[in-house]
Image: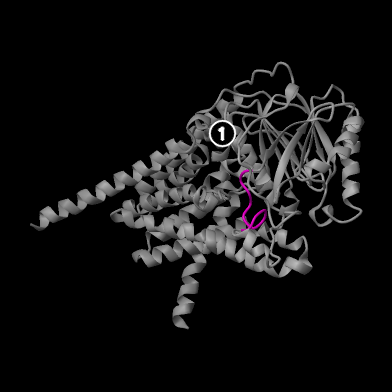
Amino acid sequence: MNRLTALSRAAVLPALAGVAAAAGQAPWGLWALSLSGYGVILWHVASAEGWRQRFFRGWAAGTGHFAAAMFWIVEPFLVDPARDGWMAPFGVTFMATGLALFWGAAALGAGLGRGWAGRVLGAALGFGLADLARSYVFTGFPWALAGHVWIDTPVAQMAAYGGPILLSALTLGLVGLPVLALGRIGPLVVACGCASALLAGVWAAGNVRLAQPLAPRDPAIQVRLVQPNATQSLKWQAGMWNVFLDRMVAASAAPSEVPLDLIVWPETSVPYLLDSAGPIIEEARVASGGVPLAVGLQREEGLRYFNTLAAFDGEGRLTGFYDKLHLVPFGEYIPLGDLFGRFGISAFAAQAGNGYSSGTEAKLLDLGRAGRVLPLICYEAVFPQDLRAFPGRADWILQVTNDGWFGSLAGPYQHLAQARLRAIEQGLPLLRDANTGVTAVIDAKGRVLQTLPLDTDGWIDTAVPPALPATLYARTGDIPATMLLLGCIGVIALNRRRLAIDRGAQGR
């Protein structure tokens, strides 16, 4: 019992620090509190004795962090609480403790260096690499990264050069400097001054980038984004899906001050398979007076089903479609889904079959007068590396999403924040059309120009904001930030080896 009590007490401080570190995530944006939390975590990990204690402290901090940042993960289980509600506490527990394993492994980085400075630097680099690993391992889940605390500040503009991993490295560097000098007043003052100067410099550079004007788009592209407020608990109920379809048709028929080039309906907003959607597409075409339409629906091919964005011209003819490539594990597909399907286990979001199949091609959609768009369906906007898989340069990014699964607390706002980061990284405007919100118009520097709030129905008419030339991140991805992290670890390792050689020589 005494040992269990001691472990519990040892977990309290890092867990609370992890909660504080989550305070910078959307919708709170308390980045200063996040920095304090990360500072305590680095100090606590660097102070640990032995790898077991380091791992445990890192894991405890991660558990607190991900439980606080991602508590909304219970929402999908509450769409049908009678069937799935019992799984909600297990979902958030497994999510928090599972993702915390990355932080436990990150804390082992403190063992790379010699002395206090080496341990702090090793821990900071470990946490930076943990964010990188989470972006790719097991199909990736780069949610609530350390760098995301800057999305609502000018610092986020640095993502145009190094993406979210560079922002994470910056975050950990800023907190690591003061931790290096703890216990010594003079060096601590100098370290805090250096960290403040670094932050001020990056903040100023971001403001300079934001102040640079964008060349207007010629000719202008006029788009209507329709938000039907199809709440997930009602979306597929008999008698209700017609209500939501009528809302979208009525929104498509509403007069516009300027001729529209495109009308967008959100992810899976049409309750028909693509081959059966002709009547509702025709109804929308007539109502809008022949405006081209991009609509989220489902597509069948043999025994496989796809989450699809389909484009129709002003005559109602299918001109192209994109099948979602990066699916949500357990939400849209279940590993070994064909096997589990025999026992009646299916993915949450799939309305046909046991789950969706992944698309096979990253392709831009040519929408005629509306330009060439890079299509993203919901969860795909979380992965910056996925956008670089598309061939050629798009005119703008279109994300259709159904954030009704995320509830109305933190989840939709965190999803929106990450979409803003994708716009900065690519230098492309992003138009976001959501079933329940937040529908938004985002410019190429990540600024939100127009929104429709959560749990409302309506539409936004907008001119697509101008694009920037391809950014450094659009050309190189995570390679520069990764090389920076690995290079710093190499320096620490070489320094450790040099110290070991020197001590060996002194011993002789």
Q: Is residue 323 left or right of residue 131?
A: right
Q: Secondary structure at mark 1?
A: helix
Circle 1: residue type: Glu
Quadrant housing the C terminus: bottom left
Q: Which residue is mark 1?
A: 425
Spot occupied by residue 113 in the image (x, y as percentages of width and height): 31, 53
Residue 372 location (% of width, % of height): 67, 26
Report the magenta stretch's main SS. loop
> Picture coordinates of residue 227 (x, y %)?
81, 41
Q: Is residue 158 visible?
A: yes
Circle 1: is it few (<14), some (14-19), or many (20+) Cα within 10 Å? many
| In-front residue for pair 273/362 | 273
In this orientation, which residue lies closer to the viewer: 151 or 181?
151
Instruction: Kindly give the residue lying farthest to the left in the view shown.
Output: 508
Quick one: which residue is furthest to the front in this view? 302
Q: Is residue 333 magenta?
A: yes
Say whether residue 481 is magenta.
no
What residue appears at the point 59 percent right and 61 percent down from the top-left corner?
A: 95
Which residue lies at the image location 73% right of the left edge and 67% below the top edge?
85
Q: Residue at x 30, y 44 (%)?
A: 491
Between 38 and 445, the one lying in front of the other is 445
Q: Is residue 439 left or right of residue 238?
A: left
The picture places residue 457, in percent across and down from the top left corner, at 85, 43
Task: Report whether 10 appears left or right of 49.
Answer: right
Q: Which residue range is magenta in the image?
A: 325-334
